Amino acid sequence: MTAALRDLVACAVDELELEWEPGVRDDEIVVTLPGEKKLKTVVSLLASRQWLVVSAFVIRNPDENHEGVYRWLLQRNVRLPGLAYAIDRSGDVYVTGRIPARLVDTAYIDQVLGVVLEAADGPFNDLLALGFLSSMKKEWAWRVSRGSPSATSRHSAPSSRAARTSLAATPPEPGATVVTPAVPRAWRRTTLAV
């Protein structure tokens, strides 16, 4: 069953025209999803006898405000169908889940990858502002002092007019729009039906 599930996942990912490669573990497929806020999201799909285990890195261990970051993640867990945020021993944040092997088909893989991408890419700027605000302020002040504002940074200043008038003091706030390259999707973001 494990090899059959791995092959099914590989065929589904090919059909969805996504970039992937074999993982380092037996029966693992690693898919790279283009992002809108993060450059990319790398997803591990590990086939086992009864499960397809899904895991994707979201953000490294926050520098500050751990309680606020973890509260925010736990509140979002309620809305993540079939998946959940988790942290590893280092405090790095992942989105992970187990899908019964009997449910896996191309449409389900498409849905799962859409949910993973939304969970990893969608809140990226909010998580940066919650867990790395002091570092962002320092970097922003440094960039402005060198005359190299947001044009050289993937995580630019907020797009609001008021924020642009005080760039040196104000990095992006949670929920702010951050300018990043738009990437078309080869699949749809949908709600996962479990």
Image: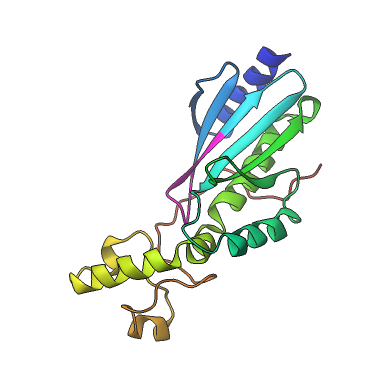
Residue 76, position in %: x, y?
69, 58
- Give residue 182's position: percent from left, percent from top: 44, 56
In this rendering, position of residue 163 left or right of residue 103: left
Q: Residue furthest left?
A: 146
Q: Is residue 6 above or below residue 38?
A: above
Query: What x and y, as percent, mark residue 98?
Result: 73, 34
Relative depth, front residue between 169 and 17? 169
The residue depicted at 58 percent of the width and 40 percent of the height is 88
Q: Who's the residue at 47% across and 55% down the image?
A: 36
Residue 156 visible in rendering:
no
* Quarter of the image with the C terminus in it: top right
Residue 36 lies, with reference to residue 57, above or below; the image says below
Residue 11 part of the magenta-drawn span: no
Q: Considering the image in quadrants, where does the N terminus appear?
A: top right
Q: How is the image coloured?
A: rainbow
* Number of residue marks: 0
Residue 184 at least partly seen: yes
- Residue at horizontal 71 percent and vertical 44 percent from the top: 83
Q: Which residues are magenta?
A: 34-43
Please name whichever residue, 108 or 16, is drawn nearer the observer in this view of the structure: 108
Q: Residue at x 41, y 86 (%)?
A: 162
Q: Position of residue 111 (x, y in %)?
A: 68, 42
Q: Decide if residue 97 is on the left or right side of residue 59.
A: right
